[in-house]
Image (cartoon, rainbow, N blue to C red):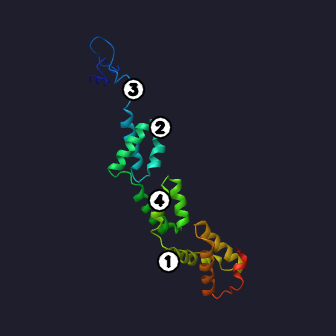
Amino acid sequence: MPEEEPFRAGPGGRGGKRGRTARPGGGSDPSRAGAEPPPQDPAERARAICLRQLTGMPRTRKQLADALRKREIPDEVAQEVLSRFEDVGLIDDAAFAGAWVESRHHGRGLARRALARELRTKGVESAVIDEAVGQLDAEREEATARDLVTAKLRSTRGLDRDRRLRRLVGMLARKGYGQGLALRVVRRALEEEGEDTEGLDEAFPD
């Protein structure tokens, strides 16, 4: 029975390697030789970086500017690209701030003070922040504080009154609620449970 012909890996013969494509005048194709492509235009790089940053979530102008600076995009190119993105609506700090306030207040129960602090760290201008947090009026903020206390109240049962007070007021303070509002809400919640709240304010003197 005749032997089976071995598999030929390439045109160079049995077991040989495929040769590199020849070019006129000698040498090899630079695309096959691993040569790097020519440097990309800074504006094109800036646009690509911004689009990647915006994929999946909005960003403020400052966040994008920081990303471009980190990647050494020249400032004048970065500002031109960012302004263009604003013109076409891909950057909108006012819309970002409004959505941030709604999401973080609804999802985390953050008060206006905490929301304003977060937006400042993202580079949103003060006037834009004021308008965004203005969505939350005092009545809605207090209602959210009451909901937060109600949800936390059960886990404090068994503690003495003053420890419960400090824990609940501290929880609201970390979310940006002022002391006066926090004390009022916590006092009401404790009274509804039948807790004696006489002298309660002495634990948090002005």
Please determine whether, in this image, residue 132 is positioned above or below residue 60.
below
Q: Does residue 85 appear left or right of residue 144 in this picture?
A: left
Nearest to the eye among marks 4 and 3: give it: 4
Q: Are marks 1 and 3 in contact (CB under 8 Å)?
A: no
Judged by depth in the image, the label closer to the viewer, 3 or 2, is: 2
| Identity of the residue drawn at 42% across and 37% down | 76
> Badge 3 is on which residue?
36
Q: Local crowd at mark 2 within 10 Å, few (<14), some, or many (≥20)?
A: few
Q: Nearer the viewer, residue 75 or 170?
A: 75
Q: What distance separates the C-alpha of mark 1 from that of mark 3?
A: 61 Å
Question: Dividing the picture into quarters, in which one does residue 103 lie?
Answer: bottom left
Q: Who comes first in sequence, dot 4 or dot 3?
A: 3
Q: CA distance from mark 4 to mark 3?
A: 47 Å
Q: Amino acid at mark 2?
A: Arg
Marks 1 and 3, the one that precedes in the sequence: 3
Q: Nearer the viewer, mark 1 or mark 4?
A: 4
* Mark 4 lies on residue: 127
Q: Please, what secondary structure does the residue beneath circle 1 have? A: helix
- Tell me the kind of residue under disc 1: Glu
Residue 174 in sight = yes
Task: Check disc 3: other Cα within 10 Å, few if <14, some if 14-19, many if 20+.
Answer: few
Q: Earlier in the sequence, mark 3 or mark 2?
A: 3
Q: Quadrant of the C terminus?
A: bottom right
Q: Residues within 10 Å of mark 4 (few under 14, many from 20)?
A: few
Task: Please tell me which of labels 1 and 4 falls first in the chain.
Answer: 4
Q: Which residue is mark 1?
A: 139
